């Protein structure tokens, strides 16, 4: 499923907040910023969040 730039931004923001609050990571990375870690999770497709789109 292809995400729009708005959906991607929303997922990265929500996941970044979760990571900064102490949520476990789903990827191995040497990055330290929660924002960079969330972007890496989205890139690898391992983000534990989903987007519900309305049926057309």
Image (cartoon, grey):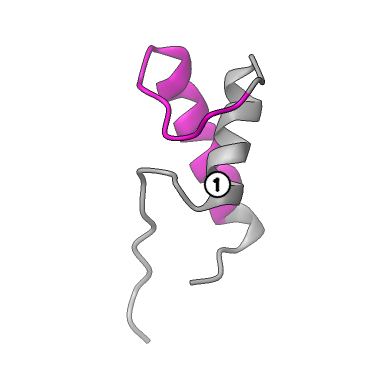
* Residue at the (45%, 47%) spot, across then down: 46
Residue 50, image x, y percentages: 36, 54
Residue 25, image x, y percentages: 42, 27
Q: List the residue tagged with mark 1.
A: 42
Instruction: Determine whether 6 is above or below 33 in the image.
Output: below
Is 12 positioned to the left or the right of 22 in the image?
right
Q: Quadrant of residue 35?
A: top right
Q: Secondary structure at mark 1?
A: helix
* Residue at the (37%, 87%) spot, across then down: 56
* Residue at the (55%, 47%) spot, across then down: 42
Residue 36, image x, y percentages: 66, 28
Between residue 24 and residue 51, name the one nearer to us: 24
Please state the extent of the stretch shown in magenta in the rendering: 7-29
* Residue at the (60%, 26%) spot, across then down: 29
Instruction: Determine whether 51 is above or below 33 in the image.
Output: below
Determine crowd level at label 1: few under 14, some 14-19, many 20+ residues with C-alpha closer than 10 A. some
Secondary structure of the magenta portion, mostly?
helix
Residue furthest out toward the bottom: 56
Q: Quadrant of residue 38?
A: top right
Instruction: Determine whether 32 is above or below 17 in the image.
Output: above
Does 30 appear in magenta? Answer: no
Does 17 appear in magenta? Answer: yes
Residue 11, image x, y percentages: 49, 43
Instruction: Determine whether 9 is above or below 38 in the image.
Output: below
Is 25 positioned to the left or the right of 3 in the image?
left
């Amino acid at each position: 499923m292809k995400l729009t730039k708005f959906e991607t931004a929303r997922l990265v923001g929500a996941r970044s907040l979760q990571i900064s609050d102490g949520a476990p990571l789903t990827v191995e990375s040497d990055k330290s910023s929660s924002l960079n870690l969330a972007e890496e999770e989205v890139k690898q497709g391992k983000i534990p969040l989903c987007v519900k789109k309305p049926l057309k």
